[in-house]
Amino acid sequence: MSARDVAREVEDALANLERLVRAGQAPSHYVARHVLLALGQALREGQEACGPWVERARTAGREGGESWRQAVQDELTLACGEFAQCLDPRYLNLPNYDREYTRSARARLEDRLRSARELGFEPSPREIEVLELADRVLAASGGHNRDGAPPSSAPQDAWTPDRPSHNDGRN
């Protein structure tokens, strides 16, 4: 996604949140997901406009009150659960296990966590435990990136021995 596309996505997500809050409607976890993913990607990429976007999200979040807090917490819970479920031991050694999807889910989760922290949110202690365990399982199952780093980079950087890199020109 280009920097312009990321900026457009952040603007769309924030405008939707602001519109809901102005109308007195409670944002859902889907709205929180859109904001957290878009803002998280912008933060990961180091976009210059992140400061004003973070402030807009904080302001809208304050106006959204408890419903916004709950939407963000619900989204973090769901995202942590999705990632943990990707690492079900019954499936890890299957020949068609999709490690790329798992690393992609982890990268998207990291984007959510990055933006949530900027907005003053943290996963619950139990979610942190689950995430740490899931990361250990992924590392033990060979789920590292080509450079040996844990899978916290962008989804397009994912690589597995059984699949070519996205950037090798063969796909």
Image: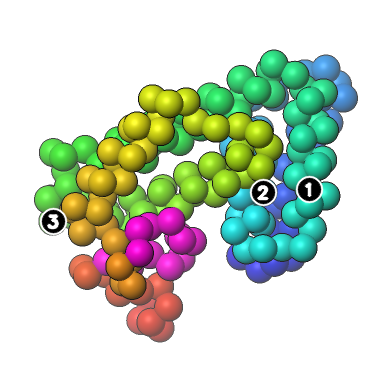
Amino acid type indicated by mark 2:
Leu
Dominant secondary structure (helix, strand or loop) of the stretch shown in magenta:
loop
Residue at 53 percent across and 24 percent down: it is 74
The residue lying toward the viewer, choosing from 109 and 27, is: 109
**165 in relation to 66, above or below:** below
What residue would you read off at disc 1? 53
Q: Nearer the viewer, mark 3 or mark 1?
A: 1
How many badges with numbers are in the image?
3
Residue at 21 percent across and 59 percent down: it is 142
State which quadrant residue 72 falls in: top right
Q: Earlier in the sequence, mark 2 or mark 3?
A: 2
Please state, as top left, top right, bottom left or bottom right, where the C terminus lies in the image.
bottom left
Give the magenta range. Answer: 149-160
What residue would you read off at disc 3? 95
Q: Earlier in the sequence, mark 3 or mark 1?
A: 1
Q: Give x and y (percent) for residue 135.
A: 31, 46
What residue would you read off at disc 2? 39
Residue at 83 percent across and 49 percent down: it is 52
